[in-house]
Image (tube, helix red, strand yellow):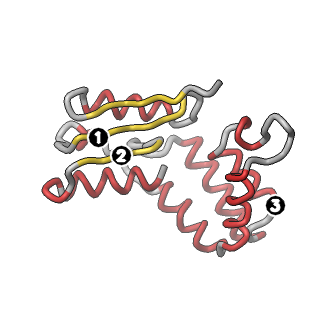
Amino acid sequence: MAGAYILTLFAMKYQELVLGLILVSPICKAPSWTEWFYNKVLMNLLYFYGMCGILKECLLQRYFSKEIRCSVQGTEADIIEACRRVLDERQGLNVMRFLQAINERYDLTEGLENLQCRTLIFVGESSQFRDESVYMSTKMGKKTCALVEHAVH
């Protein structure tokens, strides 16, 4: 999410340095008021309670689908266990700064039309970022951008 935004911003600013982009679940719009509010709640949780269990659950629910979080056997997927370990190791202040940066992002839509490099966008069919990825692909045009949607079966 944030990495794709930063790479897109870099490619728009330094077009001569970028030949192509591969973006996974990119975002290009400013946060909606609901996203902004949700991030504010998470930042307050971090500030007052640190990296607590409820905060980890909120972050995991936000970035991973239910299918990924709970596999058929009822156990957690390896990626979820790895993310839990990473969240345990991270300082709450750094996570708060990440959420603050996400909340302060601005809309890149106007600059997408001028982006010259070839771009490949990957997004999951049931991803919460699907609509924005499709929107971004449409704004960039078929000449320089290809969208790949992954279907989960």
Seen at 79% across and 65% down, the residue is 52
Label number found at residue 53: 3
The amino acid marked with disc number 2 is Ile
What amino acid is labelled 3 in the image? Gly
Q: Residues within 10 Å of mark 1 (few under 14, many from 20)?
A: many
- What residue does disc 1 label? 119
Amino acid marked by disc 1? Thr
Give yes or no for contact between labels 1 and 2 (Cβ–Cβ under 8 Å): yes
Question: Relative to residue 31, is residue 131 depicted above or below?
Answer: above
Q: Nearer the viewer, mark 1 or mark 3?
A: 1
Residue with the most extreme left position: 16
Structural crowding at the residue carrying mark 3, measured as other residues with C-alpha within 10 Å and reported as few (<14), some (14–19) or many (≥20): few
Q: Secondary structure at mark 2?
A: strand
**Residue drawn where x is 37% and y is 30% of the image:** 147
Q: Quadrant of residue 50?
A: bottom right
Spatial separation of the CA atoms under disc 2 and disc 3:
33 Å
Which residue was labeled with disc 2? 22
